[in-house]
Amino acid sequence: MLEVNNHPFPVLETERLILRQKTEADAPELFDLRSNKRVLQYLDRDPPGTVEEIVALIQTINADVENGNAVAWAITVKGDPKLVGSVAFWRMQKAHFRAELGYLLHPDFHRQGIMDEALKAVIRYGFEVMGLHSMEANVNPANAASIGLLEKNGFKKEAHFTENYYAKGKFLDSAIYSLVLGWG
């Protein structure tokens, strides 16, 4: 069974980025990110109502990190500690050495290769350090940019579920993209 050890928290560094643990000080930036209409366009969730809701979310995320049930990074640009995005392994299926990958990036940082750079580090960490055998991403089928990013990083479409969940008063589709150790 997969055992996740986040002690100490795994800070990842790339050429331009520092991926670190979220703190309550990140709440204003994470609130802005999770409230941004361009970010929410494909997420099919309601925006948070207050910064306090985000503080509680960060506390919940960090409890999952502490318990080895998630690894959730704040994405920052070197030289600036401000959160510009988020990337995480969550919904872990420890018995199957599999985790779901989720990510968000503020639109001011889109089309700069930042999420690609962050994903490459996180994917490498997932396989080489955590010991994952596979990872998946659940994507809105209309989100071409996210699908392109996943495919660029070796993910393959495994499923398209028709109207498999209900959000905002309607049934919606989802696509599952997966990456298995050794693909490529």
Image (cartoon, rainbow, N blue to C red):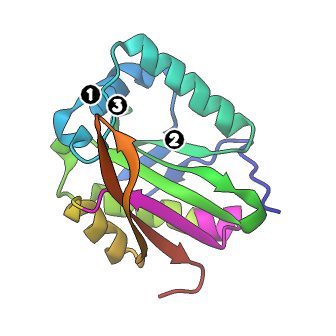
- Which mark sits nearer the N-terminus, 3 or 1? 1
- Classed neighbour count for the residue bearing mark 2: other residues with Cα under 10 Å, few (<14), some (14–19), many (≥20): many
Q: Amino acid at mark 3?
A: Lys
| Closer to us: 109 or 42 | 42
Dot 1 falls on a residue whose secondary structure is: helix
In the rendered image, residue 130, in percent from the top left (x then y), is placed at 69, 61
Q: Is 54 above or below relative to 39? A: above
Tell me which residue sits at (16%, 42%) in the image: 108
Residue 51: which disc?
A: none
Instruction: Count up the numbered dots.
Output: 3
Q: Compared to 152, does 22 lie above or below?
A: above
Query: In this picture, is 125 found above or below 84?
Result: below
The residues colored magenta run 126-141
Q: Residue at x 57, y 47 (%)?
A: 11
Tell me the quarter of the picture where residue 64 sits. Answer: top right
Q: Is residue 84 left or right of residue 138?
A: left
Residue linked to disc 3:
82
Q: Is label 1 in contact with label 2 (beta carbons under 8 Å)?
A: no
Q: Which residue is mark 2?
A: 20
**Residue 75 appears at what percent x and percent y?**
40, 44
Going from N to C along the chain, the mark reached first, 1 or 2, is 2
Q: Quadrant of the N terminus?
A: bottom right
Disc 3, SS: loop
As drawn, 124 above or below 76: below
Residue 35 is labelled as: 1
